[in-house]
Image (cartoon, grey):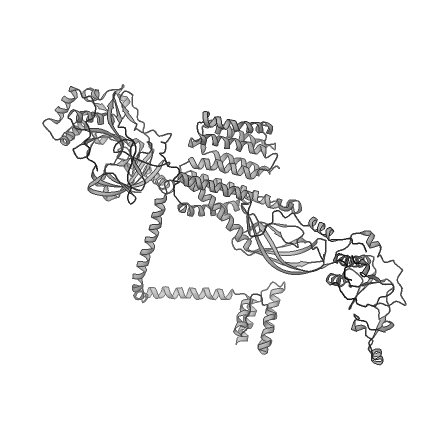
Amino acid sequence: MRREKKQELELLLLTMFAAVPLYGTQTVSIAPLLIFHAVMIAIAIRIAMGKGADVIPASVMRALGIAYVAFYAIDAAVISRSAIAASTHLVLFIAAYQPIEAMHKRNDAQRLLTTALLFIASLATATHISIVPFVIVFMFFLFRQLIHISHTDSVATGDLARRSGIIEPPSARAAGFYVTGTTLIGVLLFPMLPRVRNPLVPGMAEALNNASTGLSDSIDFNKDRSISSDATVVSRVWMGQEAIPFFTPLRLRGMVYERFFANQWLQGRRDFVPLDIRDGATRIARPSGVTQRATIQQRLVSGNRLFLPTGSYEVIGPSIYEGPTRDIYSIWNRRDLVSYDVRLARSTIPFRQRPPVLANYPVTPAVTALARQIVGTETDAMRQAVLIERFMSNTFTYLPDPAAIGRPISVDEFLLKERRGHCEYFAAGMVALMTALNTPARIVGGFYGGQLNPLTGYFVVRRADAHAWVEAWNGDRWETFDPTPAGLRPGNGSSGFQAYASALSDSVNYFWDRYILTFGLGDQIALVADAIGRIRNALTRADIGAHRGVRDFLTLRSAATAAVSVLFIVVVIAIARRRRTAFDLLRDHLRSLGIEVGQATTMEDALRELRRHHSDAATSLQPIITLYEEERFSARSTPSRTAIRKRLQELRA
Amino acid sequence: MSSAVGLSDLRREIEHHLPTSDWRFQGVVRLTRVGTAFVLFTIVIGFAAINTGNNSLYIGLAFMLGALLLSGVASQRGLRGLRVEFDSLYEAWAGRPATGRLRVANRSRIWNVRDVILTSDELAEPFFIPLIERRREIVIEASFFFARRGIVQLKTVDLYTRYPFGFFLKKRRVRISGEVVVYPRLLTDEAGRERFRAIEGEQHSVNRTGAGTEIHSFRDYVRGDSLRQVYWKKSASLGRWIMKQTELESGRAVHVVVDPFKPRGVPDDEFETMISQAATFIRDTLDRELEVIFSMPRLTLRARDQQQAAAMYRALALVEPSYEAVVQTIDRNAVLFAMRASDAA
C-alpha cells in the first residue's frame, strides 16, 4: 500500500533527522551515516518526483537483508569492534530498507519504531543542551505521523474508507497541542522518575573517548610536550562566598607521580581499595582547622578519578575507592558526569601514619649542591621547601608552551642549565631538590585555579587549567608547594567582558549539567526533603500567624480585602445561580413543595405527583411546566429560562 | 406456505449486513499493535535508563510516558464528553437497512474529538465521525438494521476511538433512549408474491361483506368481533348480541385477513413467514394502487396508499401468535393468511 506522498516524505525526513545527532556522538563512524543519509535522500527525491522508493531494487535489498545477518557478527567482532556500533549500523540499514519494503506492504508503524530507535540511539549518547530542541522537534513530527496512522487505521476499520470516503490529513495544530502537553508532563515526570541504579551492572566506566587534558598517566621528559588551550569544563566547585578566602586558589588533585624511571615520572601502582561509607559519607582523612562543605560537579576526564580539592577529608554521596594510586580516589560510575559533595579542611591528617619513602630520583652532586645553596643553613624540611619554592618561582622562567625549548630536556638540565620550562619541570625540579635534601616529595597533577562565576557563585575549572605542583612530607602529612610563578599559573587568563560572557554561557551549561544530566537519586531525596521542610515551615508560620491574624484583621486594609472578597463571592454565586437551567429552577421549586425530582423524573411526572398532594399548587405550576416543556422540546431558539424564573418568582410572591 | 426466510437464512443475512467485529471488544480499553510496540519500547528505554543512569534516556523516557499518559487522557476525556441522542427513523423493515438520524454532541470544553467510530447492534455498519469540535453538535444519518419485526428499544451505542496516537482503542458505551417499531420482513421471493397477487377487475361491488357503510347482513356475535359492529337494536330485541355486516364499498378493494392462531407444533419461523407474506402482499397490492382492507381480531383497517398502510404494518409488526383459535368473519373473497394444523412439523 502506498502512502500519500506528503506523509511519505515527512516520514523519510523524520527518519533522517533522528540520525543527525549521531554525527556528533561518535557512536558510529561518519561513513555509514553518510551512506544512510545519501540513500534516504535519494529515496526522498524519487518519491518527490512521483517515482517508487526502490532506489535499490527490492529484491537486492532483500538479499542484502539476509546477508546482513552474517555481516552483523563480522561488524561487531572485526569492523566496529563494538556491539553498540554494529547494532546502530543494523538499525540504519533497516531504516533504509523499510521505505523500499513499504512499496509492497504497509509498514509505517514499524518504520516509526525504527525511527524511534535511531532517536534513542542519538539521545542516549548526546549530552549537549541542544538535544532539548531536537527532542521537541522530533516529537512534533512523530506525533503528526502517529495521528496520521491512527486516522488511517480508524478509517480502515470495518472498511469505512470505502463507505464514507472520508480521509482527512492530521492537523499540525493537534500535533503542536500534544507536543506542548507531552513536554509539560515530561518536565514534571523527569525529576520524579526513579534514579535507582541497577545493582547487576556495576563496574568502572571507561574514560571519555575524546578526553585529552594536559594531564597524562606519566610525565615523560623524553618527548616534546604541547599543551593546547581547551576551554572544556572539567569541574565546577561551589563552596560559598565565606569559604573562598580559606580554600582558594583551588587545587583539584587527581594524579600523584612518585616514581622516576628513564627520565619519566610515573604514578605509583596500587589496586583499588574500597572505602567504608557511613551515613552516606566516606572519610578519607582527619580534618584540621576551618572546615567547609563544597559541592562538586565533575566530568570524568581520566578514567573514573575524582579530582578532589586539596583539603578534602570527606566525600558525601557516591561510593568511592582509593586507587589507582595512593591518596587518589575513584568512583563507580558509567556516566561521564558526576555530582557529589565534599568536606574541606584547611589541612588534613592521614588516618594511617605511613612515612613515605624517598623518591627514587637519581640525584646528582650538582643538584645536591644547588639544593644546599638554596636552603643555606636551614634544617627544617618545610622551611627548606618554602625556600626552594620561592627560589624557583623567582629565578626560573615559566614557559606556557613547552615546545619553545626546542628539544626534550631532563630535569637536571632544567635545574642546572635551562632554568625555564612548564609546570611539570618546575614540580619535578622541586621534587629533585627536596630528594637531594632527603625529604620525601612527589609531583601532584590536577587542575588549578579556575574562575569564579559571578552569576552562580561557583568556580569553573577547565581543561586548560591542568597543572602540576608538589607535595612534601612534613613528618605528619603532605604539605602543598607550588614552585611555578603564581601569576603564570593557569586560570589567570581572561577578564572583563569576555570573562562575564564566558560566565553567562557556563551558567546555562551548568544548569543543564546540574539539573538535567547529573540529576540523580540524591537530588530527588533533597527535593522531597526540601518540600517537607517548606510545608513544615509554612505550618509553623500559619500557627504563629493565626494569633496575629485576629489583630491584623481589624486594620482597614484587611477589612477592605475581606469586603472585596465577600463581594466577589456573592457575585460568583449570583452568576452561578443565574446560569442554572430551567430544570434546576423547577426542581428547586418542587422540592420546596415537598416533591423530590430525581434524575429519571420528568416534569410531567413531578406535576402529577404534586397534583396528588397539592392540587392548587399544581394548577398554578402547570403553565410554567408547559412553558418549560415547550422550551425543552420545541425547536424554538429563544430560551425561556428567564421567563420561567420570572413566573416562578411571581408564583412565590 | 414455503418458509422463504428460515432462521438460517436470517442468520446469514444478518452476518452479511453486520460489519466484521474483530476490532470490537468488551471493556473500555485495548492496546493496539502500535500501542503494544510503543509500551514495550518504553519499558526497554525505562530499563536502559535505570540500568545506565543516563539522564538523556530519562528525558526520552519522560517524554514517552508523557505521550502515553496524554494519549490515554485525551481519548478518555474526549469520549467522556460525547452525548448521543436518537433523533428519528423513517421506516424500519426487518432485514432491510433503514436510515435514521442520531445527534452527537461534544460537550467537552477542551478536547476536540477525532476519528470516532460509532457502533451498535442496531446499526447496519459502523459509522465513522472524523471530527466533532468541542462544544458542537452534529447530526448524522446512519444506516440501521433490524433482524426481526416488533418493538426494538435502542438502549446503547458504543463509541470507539484510537485518537490521538493510535496506542489505545478506547471504548465508551453511551446510553440512548429510542423506540422503533420494526415492520415485518418483506419477502423477496417473486414467485411467492405472485401467488397472492390481486387481479384487477376481480373485486365485487355487491353482495360482499366488508368495511363499508351499507348493511349487508347480520350474524351472531363471535369472540373477537369489534363492539363497534354490534347492531344494538336487534341485539336488544333478540336478547343476544347480533353483529352487522356491511357491504364492501369499493370494487377495487382487496380484503386481507390475518389469523394469528398458531397451532401447537408449528415452528415460529412458519408464523413469521406468514406475517411476512401478509405484509408483502399488502405492500404489493398498494403498489398496484388497489385499496386494502385489513382485518385481524378486533381490528379492521383500510388503506389506499403506503402512508395509510403504516397502521397495518405496525399491527403486523406487533402481532403475537395466538394459541387459541379466534373466530373471525371472513368474506369468501378475502385473502386469508393463517396457519393450518398441517403446517405443524
Q: Is residue B7 above or below residue A380?
A: below
Image x and y of residue A422, in percent: 25, 26
Give the residue displayed 54% in from the left and 65% down from the top. Answer: A581
Image x and y of residue A537, in percent: 31, 56
Whether residue A497 is visible here, answered yes or no, is no
- Farthest residue, direction bottom: B237
Image x and y of residue A17, in percent: 49, 35
- Tell me which corner region of the image, top left, top right, bottom left or bottom right, holds residue A274: top left
- Farthest residue, direction left: A377
Give the residue displayed 47% in from the left and 45% down from the top. Answer: B65
Depth check: A627 or B275 in front? B275
In this picture, residue A346 sits left or right of residue A2: left
In this picture, residue B193 sits left or right of residue B91: right
Q: Is residue A335 above or below residue B314?
A: above
| Tally of numbered tags | 0
Image x and y of residue A404, in percent: 27, 21
Q: Is residue A514 above or below residue A355?
A: below
Q: Quadrant of the N terminus of chain A?
A: top right
Whether residue B289 is visible here, answered yes or no, is yes
Depth check: A484 or A204 in front? A204
Q: Is residue B270 above or below residue B51?
A: below
In this picture, residue B199 sits left or right of residue B60: right
Depth check: A420 or A274 in front? A274
